[in-house]
């Protein structure tokens, strides 16, 4: 009997994958016959024809097994653990969580390939050296294209008009399945990667209907332009710098080097060699982080335009003094116009040129690491850029169902308006096509690139509820698109699984308000979605405000100044739930003035009364209360830039440049006392294992008296946090009773009302407080908190 041989290949797709003991596992026995008992075989580490690391095994099957469907996958040992299943994608079945590949054995069975990421597959990629020179290969996914050309552009212009003006060279591309490529075989110019670095280019696509269009490289590492100019296809005569990146040319870049500026270029290996000075490291547990949310564009105080990564690097001295150990950057990937928040991403591997580009991001990350600061990057996968004409929109077809990057249901004739088949999801654009591997890999591989090449330590995924919960028909927003939601779940699981395999220590958080337990259940070795934590909007809403909602709105209600009872008991649930893998915050970018009814803390805390004299003093007192409840909770605490100095101007999507506040100046000026408070509070929060544990118990809530008390503890220490938003102090003490108080001695270790913070200095001082019968009398300031530490007792 004859035999049929099949080659199996596993491609990590990124450098230094750390994969060892890679094994093929399949539904066949030792003789190659179909079996329910899967067998394993070692896979050999080797390189493919392009010089990239792959793992291969060859299996021979008896000829009589032809026509049999076989299933297979890959096991490996790596940084994340041993015997890990390395197939991160689930099968194309809404009802199945299976992670496996399958094929039908035939007489000419093709090579079976699974790519964990596509980092080495698309874009402008360096090829192995031949004769001392490395070539370059351009690859683009365009399954509907009739033909495709690589078009090189005039670097003095940086733009190609719809009539081709700006083109200096055209190179035909060859089709291989759904991928179009051009390498040294297409043009000798492409035999020298180094000579091509800095070359601007685009793709000219002949679509399935014969029309043509110019498209950027969605996998580029750089887009030309740091401005806002969109020529809209017309001949352009301006400077490359003035262009808006999503519409301009892509640029060949070399990720193996880092451009430091002024013509200085160093190897990536040398650049990262001093990333962590002796004695400096970053935290490895999410519970130990105190996160500062930072918008780079809102820096640059005193300058006429939006801030840059150089401004962010200069700002690190402020953050170091403040003491935070993590910074979360709002999106910095290429997006339309520099004067917005960045959530309309156009290119997921290219950092915005106005901000400074990908190499400047590397410099920022390194500068953070040298100070022991974790870098978390906000990324947005729930929609594409609204300005996507030269990016994802109608990439290779004008037929809506074949709009490859966007989810479309049915046929245009099914709807009164042909756009009705697109999927809305409560984001600012239509849903991506999550059932397409090439679309998923755009998001997955860009994150793998940022983690492994740019050394990003974690990601916060924007509005994941839009991906798995909110998809509806554009034509009928009351009708849910079940398949889109199901594949949104599959995508999120594939993303987290791949990140765990690529860089196990990544912090993965999601902006998700569904409170779905599966979000924080394991995905690599389970069927959860695999996030470490989710943003906890209800915590903010209960503590601060949320228009027309039933939440407690403690600070907002206190700001009316009429002594009304506050719903401390209602907020207690959110405070207790902060222990359930939550990122908690008193303010985030969404809540500082952009959303209707929202505002910065100080104006909100006094019902928008003029912030002068005693009114500002009361506002700061309530702001100190809000910060303390956040940073002393059982969640991972975060606060938005400027809160530490009492910023008062609204932070909005479209005019943040006009409303910037000089944070570093205010830290030594009018905001100095609040800054000192935040600095000491951050130190208390991150300096105690008990406070950074997940242990919390709310022991008292008195709505009429506006009092809230809760315990924090670990095996070593116990703290009792008592807060009041009353308009008068409890100078003679406030009796609290709870079994956790026990019978013993407590001492005040922190008081938000201290004179150094601008308070009235009412508290318990250094005297020891004795509890008897599990009851304790605690002096409470007005609109403040005191933290007691157990010094004796059970």
Image (cartoon, helix red, strand yellow):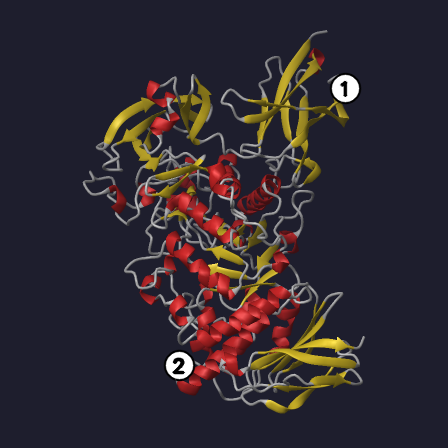
Q: Secondary structure at mark 2?
A: loop
Residue 180, horizontal then vertical, whole percent? 41, 25
Vertical relation: 508 (above or below) 391: below
For label 2, the crowd category at 10 Å Cα-Cα, with few meaning under 14, some 14 to 19 and many 20 or more, is: some
Residue sitting at x 62%, y 48%: 529
Single out the residue that lies furthest toward the front.
278
Mark 2 or 1 closer to N-term? 1
For label 1, the crowd category at 10 Å Cα-Cα, with few meaning under 14, some 14 to 19 and many 20 or more, is: some
Q: CA distance from mark 2 to mark 1?
A: 79 Å
Q: Is residue 552 left or right of residue 78?
A: left
Q: Does residue 376 appear in this view?
A: no
Q: Is residue 214 left or right of residue 91?
A: left
Instruction: Using the image, tell me which numbered label, if any, was put on residue 562.
Output: none
Q: Secondary structure at mark 1?
A: loop
Quadrant of the drawing holding the C terminus: bottom right
Q: Is residue 704 left or right of residue 745?
A: left
Single out the residue that lies furthest toward the bottom.
732
Residue 215, horizontal then vertical, whole percent? 34, 35
Check disc 2 and report the residue beneath it.
Answer: 611
In which image quadrant can residue 524 be found?
A: top right
Vertical relation: 15 (above or below) 355: above
Q: Does residue 472 appear in this view?
A: yes
Instruction: Using the image, tell me which numbered label, if any, was put on residue 30.
Output: 1
Residue sitting at x 43%, y 16%: 131
Residue 288, horizontal then vertical, whole percent? 62, 59
């Amino acid at each position: 009997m004859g035999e049929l041989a099949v080659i199996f290949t596993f491609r990590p797709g990124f450098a230094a994958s750390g994969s060892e003991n890679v094994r093929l596992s399949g539904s066949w026995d030792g003789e190659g016959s179909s079996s329910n008992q899967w067998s394993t075989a070692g896979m050999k580490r080797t390189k493919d024809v392009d010089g990239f690391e792959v793992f291969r095994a060859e299996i021979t099957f008896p000829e009589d097994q032809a026509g049999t469907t076989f299933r297979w996958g890959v096991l490996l040992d790596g940084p994340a653990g041993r015997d890990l299943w390395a197939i991160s994608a689930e099968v194309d079945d809404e009802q199945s969580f299976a992670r496996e590949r399958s094929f039908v054995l035939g007489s000419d069975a093709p090579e079976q390939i699974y790519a964990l990421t596509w980092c080495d597959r698309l874009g402008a990629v360096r090829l192995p050296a031949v004769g001392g020179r490395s070539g370059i290969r351009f690859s683009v996914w365009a399954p509907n294209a009739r033909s495709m050309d690589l078009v090189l552009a005039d670097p003095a212009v940086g733009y190609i008009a719809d009539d081709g003006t700006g083109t200096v060279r055209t190179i035909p591309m060859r089709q291989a399945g759904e991928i179009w490529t051009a390498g040294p075989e297409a043009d000798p110019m492409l035999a020298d990667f180094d000579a091509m670095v800095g070359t601007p280019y685009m793709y000219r696509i002949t679509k399935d209907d014969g029309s043509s269009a110019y498209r950027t490289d969605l996998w580029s590492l750089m887009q030309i332009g740091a401005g806002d100019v969109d020529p809209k296809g017309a001949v352009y005569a301006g400077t490359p710098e003035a262009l808006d990146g999503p519409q301009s040319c892509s640029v060949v870049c070399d990720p193996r080097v880092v451009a430091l500026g002024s013509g200085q270029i160093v190897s990536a290996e040398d650049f990262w060699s001093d990333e962590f000075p002796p004695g400096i490291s970053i935290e490895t547990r999410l519970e130990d982080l105190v996160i500062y949310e930072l918008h780079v564009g809102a820096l640059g105080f005193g300058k006429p335009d939006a801030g840059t990564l150089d401004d962010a690097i200069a700002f690190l001295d402020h953050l170091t003094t403040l003491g935070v150990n993590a910074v979360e950057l709002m999106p910095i990937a290429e997006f339309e116009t520099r004067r917005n928040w960045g959530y309309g991403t156009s290119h997921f591997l290219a950092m915005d040129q106005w901000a400074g580009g990908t190499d400047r991001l590397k410099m920022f990350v390194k500068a953070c690491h040298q100070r022991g600061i974790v870098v978390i990057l906000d990324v947005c996968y729930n929609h594409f850029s609204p300005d996507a004409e030269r990016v994802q929109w109608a990439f290779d077809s004008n037929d809506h169902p074949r709009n490859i990057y966007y989810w479309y249901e049915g046929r245009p004739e099914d709807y009164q308006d042909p756009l009705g088949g697109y999927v809305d999801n409560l984001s600012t654009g239509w849903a991506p096509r999550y059932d397409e591997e090439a679309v998923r890999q755009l998001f997955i591989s860009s994150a793998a690139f940022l983690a492994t090449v740019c050394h990003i330590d974690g990601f916060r995924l924007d509005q994941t509820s839009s991906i798995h919960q909110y998809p509806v028909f554009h034509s009928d927003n009351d009708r849910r698109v079940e398949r889109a939601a199901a594949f949104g779940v599959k995508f999120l699981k594939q993303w987290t699984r791949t990140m765990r395999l690529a860089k196990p220590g990544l912090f993965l958080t999601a902006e998700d308000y569904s409170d779905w337990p599966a979000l924080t259940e394991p995905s690599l070795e389970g069927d959860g979605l695999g996030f470490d934590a989710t943003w906890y909007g209800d915590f903010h809403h209960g503590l601060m405000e949320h228009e027309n909602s039933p939440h407690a709105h403690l600070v907002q209600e206190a700001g009316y100044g009429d002594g009304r009872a506050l719903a401390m008991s209602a907020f207690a649930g959110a405070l207790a739930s902060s222990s359930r893998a939550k990122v908690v915050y008193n303010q985030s970018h969404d809540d500082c003035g952009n959303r209707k009814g929202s505002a910065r803390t100080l104006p909100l805390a006094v019902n928008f009364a003029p912030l002068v004299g005693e009114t500002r003093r009361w506002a700061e007192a309530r702001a100190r209360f809000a910060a303390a409840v956040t940073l002393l909770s059982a969640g991972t605490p975060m606060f938005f830039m400027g809160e530490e100095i009492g910023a008062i101007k609204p932070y909005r999507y479209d005019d943040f440049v006009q409303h910037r506040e000089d944070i570093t100046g205010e830290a030594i000026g009018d905001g100095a006392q609040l800054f000192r408070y935040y600095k000491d509070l951050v130190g208390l929060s991150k300096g105690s294992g008990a406070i950074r544990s997940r242990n919390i118990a709310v022991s008292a809530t008195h709505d009429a008296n506006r009092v809230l008390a809760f315990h924090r503890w670990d095996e070593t220490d116990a703290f009792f946090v008592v807060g009041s938003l009353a308009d008068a102090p409890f100078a003679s003490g406030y009796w609290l009773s709870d079994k956790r108080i026990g019978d013993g001695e407590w001492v005040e270790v922190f008081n938000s009302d201290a004179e150094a913070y601008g308070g009235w200095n009412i508290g318990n001082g250094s005297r020891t407080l004795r509890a008897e019968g599990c009851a304790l009398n605690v002096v409470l300031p007005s609109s403040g908190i005191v933290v007691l530490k157990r010094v004796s007792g059970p």
